[in-house]
Amino acid sequence: MPIAVGRLADDPVQDPRGDLPQVRHLGWGKAVWLIFVVVLPFLGVLMHQRDTEHARAARAEFDDYVESTAGLGGPAAEIDKAKQLLDRGAITQAEFDAIKAKALG
């Protein structure tokens, strides 16, 4: 197979342009192709990273909201804390019963 002089060979193995489309003139065709092959995937990766960081921040904000709204422990934690105070002698049995009744209902 003779090698073409003055232009690139049509054989893709010998073509140094690789898989570039065969555009006979230099210009906007190759520029548009380059944007689709290189620039758009890169932008997609950046957008995905930004969305992932935004989702992480939103999740952390939601978790903080749930913890602040739900409180830590509920009625059982209040009764346990009151029992510890009763065992140390900081409150009386009547005060413990009042705290327990308030916590349960």
Image (cartoon, rainbow, N blue to C red):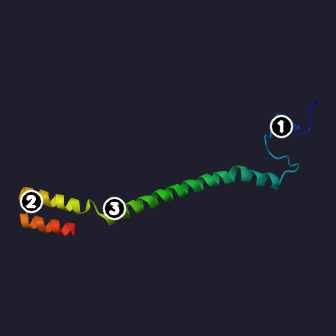
At mark 2, the secondary structure is helix
Q: CA distance from mark 3 to mark 1?
A: 62 Å
Left or right: where 86 falls relative to 44:
left
- Coordinates of residue 85 in the picture (x, y in percent): 11, 59
Left or right: where 64 falls relative to 90:
right
- The image shows residue 92, relative to residue 39, as above or below, that is below
The quarter of the picture where residue 11 lies is top right
Front residue (pair 65, 74): 74
Q: How would you rate the neighbour count of disc 2 (Cα within 10 Å): few for under 14, some for 14-19, many for 20 or more?
A: some
Say whether disc 3 or disc 1 marks the residue closer to the N-terminus. Answer: 1
Going by the numbered disc 1, the residue's amino acid type is Pro
Q: Which residue is mark 1?
A: 12
Q: Residue furthest top?
A: 1
At mark 1, the secondary structure is loop
Q: How would you rate the neighbour count of disc 3 (Cα within 10 Å): few for under 14, some for 14-19, many for 20 or more?
A: few
- Residue at x 68% of width, y 52% of height: 39
Instruction: Identify the mark at residue 86; answer none if there is no mark.
Output: 2
- Quadrant placement of the N terminus: top right
Front residue (pair 97, 90): 97
User: Mark 1 or mark 2: which is in front?
Assistant: 2
Going by the numbered disc 3, the residue's amino acid type is Glu
- Quadrant placement of the C terminus: bottom left
Q: Which residue is mark 3?
A: 67
Say whether disc 2 or disc 3 marks the residue closer to the N-terminus. Answer: 3
- Coordinates of residue 92 in the picture (x, y in percent): 6, 64
User: Do labels 3 and 1 touch, CB within 8 Å?
Assistant: no
Left or right: where 2 falls relative to 92:
right
- Coordinates of residue 90 in the picture (x, y in percent): 7, 61
User: Mark 3 or mark 1: which is in front?
Assistant: 3
Q: CA distance from mark 2 to mark 3?
A: 28 Å
Going by the numbered disc 2, the residue's amino acid type is Leu
